[in-house]
Amino acid sequence: MWRGRLFFLCLALALLSGCAPGGPVAEAGADAQLPADKLIAITFDDGPRRNTTERLLDGLQERGASATFFLIGKQIEGNEDLVRRMQAEGHQVGSHTWNHVRLQGISRETLQREVGRTEETLEALLGGGPYWLRPPYGAVDAADRELLQVPMIKWSIDPRDWEKLNTAQVKAAVLENAAPNQIILLHDIYDTSVDAALEIVDTLQGEGYRFVTVQELLEQLCRETAYAAFQFPVTVLSGMEQGLPLAEAWAAGIRQDKAVPEPAKKLLLPLGEELGASDLDGQAATLAQYRMQLEPYAAEAGEKCVQRQRLYCSLGLLGGLLAAILLC
């Protein structure tokens, strides 16, 4: 249930390795390990809807593209076969609440019912869980994040397809902003959006992009060479899966990781208390402050990476995901 926090763990690694924007970028030597693909995630809200979702799944299957679907719980009944198909064909299934309710300013009982009922329905249908959540309108009160205890995913590219209802305009808006490690927001309840989505996939696949689920995107970022020397992401995730609060697991992971310089450990330890404690803008500001404090260590680590020809820096990690994802 804590895998959604991978982004912030990756971000800390980027700061330490010198891979933040403005950090040193090395020329790839013969031994450098670079990713083979440009990864991007396409996501769909508000489904499932029989005709459009089925047509979208057919198109994605033909193209070998994976996607992430954030489902409205009350619309699952009667479309169970489509949801099972999503899972069977390698797509990620998540929750968009039961009634598409704005989660801000509602009672905790309503909040838990909206999220919990969809979660229970998906677990009964697909097993596993918990299922990642996209809050309707991207809105949730900070005080309720720890209550929900599920990863929350936003987006970095929003063409406002629900407003345009125009395939060409939606496609153009996405392609204009497309870059590695971005998360695209669309809605699979509109024919124009399904048409645009498949044309977007065709175009970007032709440019060398590979479409993956949001979870696959985040996990791949943490496997990149620039992060390979650090052990604390695994330690932190293991601790949280065992029931430790994030702050406690974070502190243990940082203290135990010999690859993190001691002065940097002192700076990073308080970060565990701040991850997920504010809205997206607050998180961006917090992480920017940590980056400034860690720049001396990032520069030093970057020089070592250059010397070893093992530095790979993905600007999309910060440029896209930092602006895209609110993980709680």
Image (cartoon, helix red, strand yellow):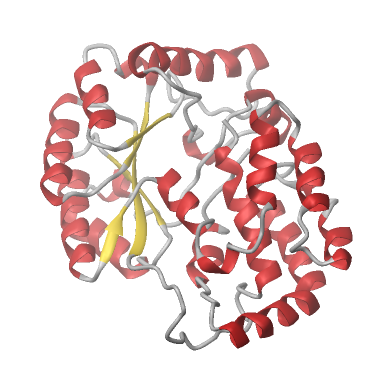
For this rendering, which residue is in front, 157 or 208? 208
Residue 142, percent from left and from top: 70, 36
- Whether 201 is drawn above or below 145: the answer is below
Q: Can residue 181 be seen in this view?
A: yes
Residue 93, percent from left and from top: 36, 31
Q: In which quarter of the image is residue 47?
A: top left
Residue at the image position 73 percent from the left and 37 percent from the top: 246
- Whether 247 is drawn above or below 179: the answer is above
Residue 214 located left or right of residue 313 = left
Q: Quadrant of the N terminus?
A: top right
Q: Can residue 273 be seen in this view?
A: no
Residue 108, percent from left and from top: 66, 16
Q: In which quarter of the image is residue 188?
A: top left
Residue at the image position 43 percent from the left and 18 percent from the top: 98
Residue at the image position 44 percent from the left and 73 percent from the top: 33
For this rendering, which residue is in front, 184 or 248? 248
Q: In which quarter of the image is the C terminus?
A: top right
Residue 107, percent from left and from top: 66, 16
Residue at the image position 58 percent from the left and 30 percent from the top: 150
Residue 245 located left or right of residue 262 = left
Q: Quadrant of residue 104?
A: top right
